[in-house]
Image (cartoon, rainbow, N blue to C red):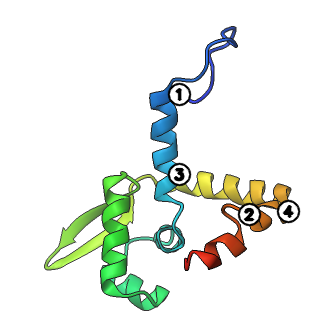
Amino acid sequence: MAMTQAAGDATTPPEAAALAVAASLFHGFSDRSRLAIVQHLLAGEHRVVDLTGHLGLAQSTVSKHLACLLDCGIVQVRSQGRASLYSLAHPESTLELLSAAERLLGLTGDAVALCPTYGLRATEEDGQ
């Protein structure tokens, strides 16, 4: 993903396609349930039933979000007998991204939580 400009080419804006792909990646992490699933998968492989028990979510909700994460290439699945085991496709990079997000959240203080568009109050009003 080439989101940064080439050195010495400061007048050329980033390509719209690269930005769209980056936005799609972050959309994969934007839902609380998907983020909780990703954080849980940092510990290793899980079955859907394991995730529903750990997270207190309905099986259909977990399956829907795993399908999204699978489509985005964030998770992978392997069969073991009749069970499907889900894991992160790129655990080290995912951990780096989440760690960077935590550092950035620490730097922004309450700004993200107070954001009128995506902050806590806005998501409560949307029922998320």
Q: Residue at x 23, y 73 (%)?
A: 84
Under mark 4, the amino acid is Gly
The residue singled out by tag 3 in the image is 26
Under mark 1, the amino acid is Ala
The disc placed on residue 109 is 4
In this rendering, the answer to whether 76 lies above or below 48 is above
Under mark 2, the amino acid is Pro
Choose the circle earlier in sequence order: 2 or 1: 1
In this rendering, the answer to whether 79 lies above or below 14 is below
Choose the circle earlier in sequence order: 3 or 2: 3
Q: Residue at x 30, y 82 (%)?
A: 60
Q: Is residue 90 left or right of residue 94?
A: left
- Quarter containing the C terminus: bottom right
The residue singled out by tag 1 in the image is 2
The residue singled out by tag 2 in the image is 116
Task: Tell which residue pokes out farthest to the top in this image.
Answer: 8
Q: Is residue 62 left or right of residue 107?
A: left
Q: Secondary structure at mark 1?
A: loop
- Using the image as rendered, state which of residue 45 and residue 102 is in the foreground: 102
Under mark 3, the amino acid is Phe
Report the Cα–Cα distance between label 1 and label 4: 29 Å
